[in-house]
Image: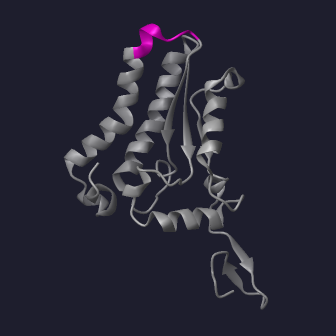
Amino acid sequence: MRQEALTGSFMETSKSAFNIAMEISVYSLIELTHKLEPVLSDKASILTLTYLGGPQYIPNYNVMGVAKAALESTVRYMSVELGRKGQRVNALSAGPIKTLAAAGIGDFKSILKWNECNAPLQKNVTTLEVGNSAMYLLSDLASGVSGEVHYVDAGYNIMGMAAVEKNDAGRTVFSWDESK
């Protein structure tokens, strides 16, 4: 994925960048699952990674948001088709974590700070927490779960507005405002 597809104008996304994002983020799941189908057990669990930028606008995510929305829809369609065989398909949507992939997202440090200040748990998640949720979804503990997007983001996905609080003067301020 080229950097300009994430940081430039969304409307100026090239066809090539769009196709690359869709192939890597969406079609790869379909193709890999299809090729593995002959060896998958009747209780197989398939898991993919997504991000909140699919169902909601996230600055500097651009074409990847569209690709993640398509990926989440693909999870639902695959879960119906593979569910007939007893196989499950889910997506795990992790909050922002410092990774190599995240390094390509513009102003990522601000996204981490925003999430920490506005998530109900007032923190960012760790790779261990994401891994634990993945283990749950892949295990028999989630034998009745398919076609879902499971959020591991300290609750950030439920927020409709930035976190606010009252200062000493009774004025509403945002939780990250240093001049409270």
Question: Foreground: 76 or 19?
Answer: 19
Counting from the top left corner in percent of width and height, residue 160 is at: 62, 61
In the displayed structure, does residue 100 sit left or right of residue 179?
A: left
Depicted 141 relative to depicted 68: above or below: above
Counting from the top left corner in percent of width and height, residue 64 is at: 38, 49
Counting from the top left corner in percent of width and height, residue 107 is at: 43, 67
Q: Which quadrant of the structure image shows residue 117?
A: bottom right
Depicted 14 relative to depicted 118: above or below: above
**Does the stretch in magenta take in 39?**
yes
Residue at left offset 69%, top offset 62%: 122
Q: In this orientation, does residue 61 appear?
A: no
Depicted 143 relative to depicted 27: above or below: above
Counting from the top left corner in percent of width and height, residue 140 is at: 68, 20
The residue stretch that appears in magenta: 36-42
Residue at left offset 38%, top offset 35%: 26
Count numbered badges in the picture.
0
**Does the stretch in magenta take in 163?**
no
